[in-house]
Amino acid sequence: MHADELTERFREKFHMPPRVFIAPGRVNLIGEHLDYNDGFVLPCAIEFSTRAAVGPRSDQKLVLRSAEFAEPFEFDLSSLPRKPLGTWSDYVLGVAIMLRQAGHLPHGANLLVHGEVPIGAGLSSSAAIEVATALALLSLTKAKLPLPEIAKLCQRAENEFVGARVGIMDQFVSCLGKAGHALLLDCRSLDFELVPLPEQVKLVICNTMVKHELSGGEYNRRREECEEGVRILSKSIPGIRALRDVTPQQLLAAVNAIPPVIYKRCLHVVEEIQRVLQAVDCLRSGNLDEMGLLMSASHRSLRDLYEVSCGELDAMVEAADGLPGYYGGRMTGGGFGGCTINLVAFEHSEAFRESIAERYRERTGISPEIYVCSSADGAHVELRTTAV
């Protein structure tokens, strides 16, 4: 659904013209589970996006509608829920609560959202709706927040209201991504650099069509395991704040002091940070073969050390091996289902799409969805629509 159709639906529901804002999902090329360890990540914004159409109200009501879900929601800004409701509205509510606490939401609003980022696929549909909502609601005020601040506000909404202890990566690249580029993000300082993607490759995202229910609790548990690793390591490495501060040599020296499972989690993080920095050099030099090897090593680490893969993800990665034009691939996102990301030569991308789908179907009996993508621009207002 494009902005003009969403505009028309908004007019029908609320009898006023909206502004429409768009925020993309993301795929992470390499650097998984590093953002909450203060590491480096290398995501891209992608062409799947969420749109939010917004109009002002003169009262204190926040009225929410979705193009995908029938259930409407209406809240009073003076008494917003303190706990999540377990519906799509939680991501909007969390952002509204953070804006309200910051003094940036003095009046009510009508909001209609439409999402095309596949839910549960690990492509950050949650960040897309959060960022689109934040831009939409802020447009009704005089507040001018820089995009990095908007990203941090949306992260707080997911951490503190929704209850998912996500890092900053998803919201940041949804705000600041750029077409034709990946974004190297230092998750501690929030310094970032746009890294051009070679024109001869496509991003092929392969959706396993499974999402195992244990993923939410396991995600938080991995974060706790990393924090435990830091607590243990800080006894012998004074001054460390996160696993980002630990070298491979320091970790190896402490192997006997760390429980085996915690050591595996730490080893993934420490080695994955090195892979991210090497991957940036590969993209800059156009060494796609080496980039592919790094992605494959990342998947093995996520499977064997961090233990967030699953049979279907492994089957999808294995199904890509040997296909023409394939440089490398890995699981992407939190894990336990969702998608793999593959770098594929432009001229082979369509044949790759067909072949990997057939191979995966033969191995699992599941029909996957395969998306041939390019990187996209970050969140912005869609100027084709009528302003409020």
Image (cartoon, rainbow, N blue to C red):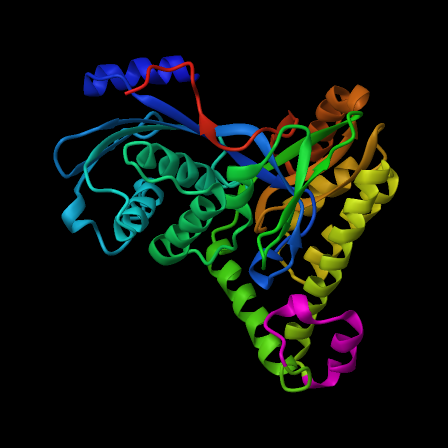
- Residue 95: which quarter of the image? top left
Q: Residue at x 29, y 21 (%)?
A: 18
306 left or right of 143 in image? right
Residue 116 appearing in the image: no
Comparing 383 with 87, the one in front is 383
- Residue 249: which quarter of the image? bottom right
Residue 201's spot in the image, x, y percent?
Answer: 77, 28
370 left or right of 304 in image? left
Comparing 191 with 84, the one in front is 191
How many badges with numbers are in the image? Answer: 0
- Residue 305: which quarter of the image? bottom right
323 left or right of 49 in image? right
Range shown magenta = 239-257
Residue 345 located within the stretch drawn in magenta: no
Q: Main secondary structure of the magenta part?
A: helix
Comparing 77 with 261, the one in front is 77
Quadrant where the N terminus sits is: top left
Comparing 91 with 368, the one in front is 91
Quadrant where the C terminus sits is: top left
Q: Residue at x 70, y 31 (%)?
A: 203
Residue 65 appearing in the image: yes
Residue 39's spot in the image, x, y percent?
Answer: 64, 59
Residue 59's spot in the image, x, y percent?
Answer: 12, 35
Q: Residue at x 65, y 34 (%)?
A: 206
Q: Residue furthest left?
A: 59
Residue 243 located within the stretch drawn in magenta: yes
Residue 11's spot in the image, x, y percent?
Answer: 25, 15
Up-down: is 112 above or below 293?
Answer: above
Up-down: is 162 above or below 384?
Answer: below
